[in-house]
Amino acid sequence: MTHDDPTDLALLAALDETPQALAPDSPYEALAPVHRADPTDMPGAVALGEVPEDIIAAGPVIPLPLRTVSGRYRGSSAGFQVELRVDVDGRHPLAKLSGDFFSVSGATVTYFGSFIVDTPAVSTTPTTITARGSGRFTFAAGAPVVQVTIPRRQILQPAAPATLRFFTAGGAPGATYICAFESAYFRTVQLETDRVSDVVTPVFAGYNTGSLPSASGGAGRALSVVSAYAEAGIGMIPTSGSDVIAIAEAMANKDLVGLRAACLDGPPLLALPQRAPVESVAGRLPAA
C-alpha cells in the first residue's frame, strides 16, 4: 500500500486509527497475574524505623546524571520510514528538528522528502523532553506541525525511543512514528584521505588546541579531523582505502593555479551559513 503524504490522516486510517506501536491491546495483558513471595516480608528484614549502620555511614545517595536526547532516531509506519534528527540539548545545540522520509515497497527503499523545524518550542520536565513547532517540508504536508517527545534516562541506561507525531494546522492528529535511538551523530560519513607521491610530510593526524599561541575560545584538547566533526555532530569513519597517487597522474601545477584563480574571480561554488569560529568548534553543523 502506498500513500501520498507520510504526515497526514490517511496513515491513521491505514493503521485502524492507532499506530501499531501504540496499540492498547497488548498480548501481555491477557496473562494471569503470577503470585510470588512477598519481597517486603523476608526473613531478617529490618524492622520499621531501624536503619542499618552501614547504610547510615554510606551517606546520601547521589543520583546519576541524565543522558542528552540529541541524536539520530529511526522509525517506520504504513509503508514509510523516517530518519529523525533531534538537536535540542547537549553542547551548543542549534535547537532544531529535522528528518528524511523514505517510501518502502518490499526490499526497495526510495527517498520521499524531508522536513526541518527551525525554532521548536522545547519543554523539559524531570522525565521527558518535548519539542514542537511548524515544519518546512519538501512536499505538501497535510499535517505540518511536528512534535517529538523523548523520555529522559540516566547515563547508564539505554537511550529511550522518540515519539514523532504530526498534527494539522488546526490541531488534528496525523501520523505517529516510534523511532528507536540510532546514534548520537546526526550524520555518518566515510572518510578517505589520499595524498600525492611527492608529499613527504606526514598526513595530518591532530593537534592540541592548548598549544596555540592565543586562546582559541574552547577548552584545550587533542583535536583531529574525526573528533572535530564529532563535536559538530557528524560521525566520520576513516576507511582503509587511503592511497598514494603518483604525482605524474595528478593535475599539472599550471592547471591548479588556473583553477584557483577562476574560483577566486568567479562566483562562490558553495555558500555556507556563518557559524561559530572554526578554532573553537563551538557551533554545530545544521541538523538538516
Image: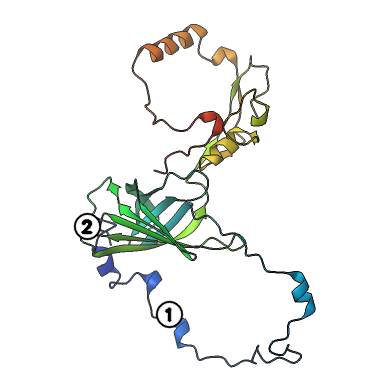
Label 1 neighbourhood size at 10 Å, few (<14), some (14-19), many (20+)?
few
Apparent side of residue 282 relative to residue 201 in the rendered image (left or right): left
SS under mark 1: loop
Q: Is residue 155 left or right of residue 186?
A: right
Q: Position of residue 268 (x, y in %)?
A: 36, 20
Residues 55 and 86: in front is: 55
Above or below residue 168? Residue 251 is above
- 100 relative to 149, above or below: above
- Residue lying at 60% horizontally and 59% vertically, measured from the top left: 65
Residue 105, can we see it?
Answer: no
The numbered mark at residue 26 is: 1
Residue lying furthest top in this view? Answer: 254
The location of residue 231, given as percent across then percent down, is: 55, 40
Name the secondary structure under disc 2. Answer: loop
Q: Position of residue 1 (x, y in %)?
A: 28, 62
Residue sitting at x 73%, y 69%: 59
Which amino acid, by three-letter code, is at mark 2? Ala
Residue 149 position, x and y percent, is: 41, 61
Q: Which residue position is annotated with label 2? A: 169
Choose mark 1 or mark 2, whichever is in front: 2
Residue 57 as seen in the image, left or right of residue 229? right
Q: Which residue is pictured at 29% across the width and 57% down the height? A: 6
Type of the residue with mark 1? Ser
The residue at the far left in this view is 170
Q: Image quadrant of residue 39? A: bottom right
Report whether residue 90 is seen. Answer: yes
State yes or no: discs 1 and 2 in contact (Cβ < 8 Å). no
Please state which of residues 166 and 25 is positioned toward the viewer in this rendering.
166
Name which residue lies at 54% across and 37% down. 229
Return the residue nearer the eye: 39 or 71.
Answer: 39
The C terminus, quarter of image: top left
Quick check: 241 left or right of 185? Answer: right
